[in-house]
């Protein structure tokens, strides 16, 4: 089954949530809340809102790995508007090379089917 969400005009971090979150009490609390919500329905592509931050998450089919340049150590890929990267729970500079920033000057859609993520100009095949 395919699940689709609309993305607003803007920039998006695409990668592992743990790789962009600061190792601090606040960062760990954010991740714990994320996992608690996500694992209620781990096989679904989900829109979550935690601490006022809205983002999309999907698991990969194969768990950890690098999929079309996107790396994950948690088996989960996050689609996060970059406007939230100024929050103190996120890293100001991301040193890991296995993520992508996607920029859209218009509304667009992102879909997940069989744990594969499809943007209009990029796809992440995890199976």
Image (cartoon, rainbow, N blue to C red):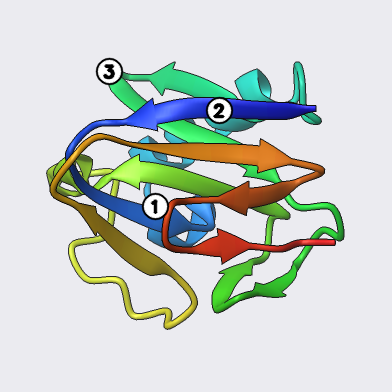
Question: How far across and down, in percent of the image, does residue 122 sit?
Answer: 48, 63
Disc 1 residue crowd, few under 14, some 14–19, many 20+, Cα 10 Å: many
Q: Which residue is mark 3?
A: 52
Nearer mark to the viewer, of 2 and 1? 2
Contact (Cβ within 8 Å) of mark 2 with mark 1: no
Question: How far across and down, in percent of the image, does residue 5 sit?
Answer: 47, 26
Residue 33 visible in image: no
Disc 2 residue crowd, few under 14, some 14–19, many 20+, Cα 10 Å: some
Question: How far across and down, in percent of the image, does residue 33 sit?
Answer: 54, 24
Q: Which corner quadrant holds the C terminus? A: bottom right
Q: Is residue 60 above or below residue 8?
A: below
Contact (Cβ within 8 Å) of mark 3 with mark 1: no
**Which one is nearer the viewer's eye here, 72 or 111?**
111
The mark found on residue 21 in the picture is 1
Specify the quadrant of the image occupied by residue 96. Answer: bottom left
Q: Is residue 117 above or below residue 66?
A: above
**Which one is nearer the viewer's eye here, 69 or 74?**
69
Question: How far across and down, in percent of the image, does residue 113 sit?
Answer: 74, 40
Q: Earlier in the sequence, mark 3 or mark 1?
A: 1
Look at the numbered disc 2 and give the secondary structure of its residue: strand
Q: Which residue is mark 2?
A: 4
* Residue at position x 59%, y 25% in the image: 46
Q: Earlier in the sequence, mark 2 or mark 1?
A: 2
Q: Say whether residue 123 is left or right of residue 104.
A: right
* Residue at position x 50%, y 46% in the image: 78
* Residue at position x 21%, y 71% in the image: 93
């Amino acid at each position: 089954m395919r699940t689709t969400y609309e993305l607003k005009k803007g920039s998006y971090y695409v990668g592992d949530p743990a790789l962009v979150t600061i190792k601090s009490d606040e960062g760990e609390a954010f991740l714990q809340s994320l996992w608690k919500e996500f694992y209620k329905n781990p096989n679904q592509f989900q829109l979550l809102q935690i601490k006022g931050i809205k983002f999309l998450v999907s698991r990969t089919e194969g768990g950890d790995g690098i999929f079309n340049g996107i790396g994950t150590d948690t088996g989960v890929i996050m689609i996060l508007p970059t406007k939230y990267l100024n929050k103190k729970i996120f890293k100001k500079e991301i040193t890991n090379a296995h993520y992508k920033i996607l920029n859209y000057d218009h509304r667009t859609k992102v879909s997940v089917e069989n744990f594969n993520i499809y943007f209009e100009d990029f796809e992440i095949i995890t199976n």
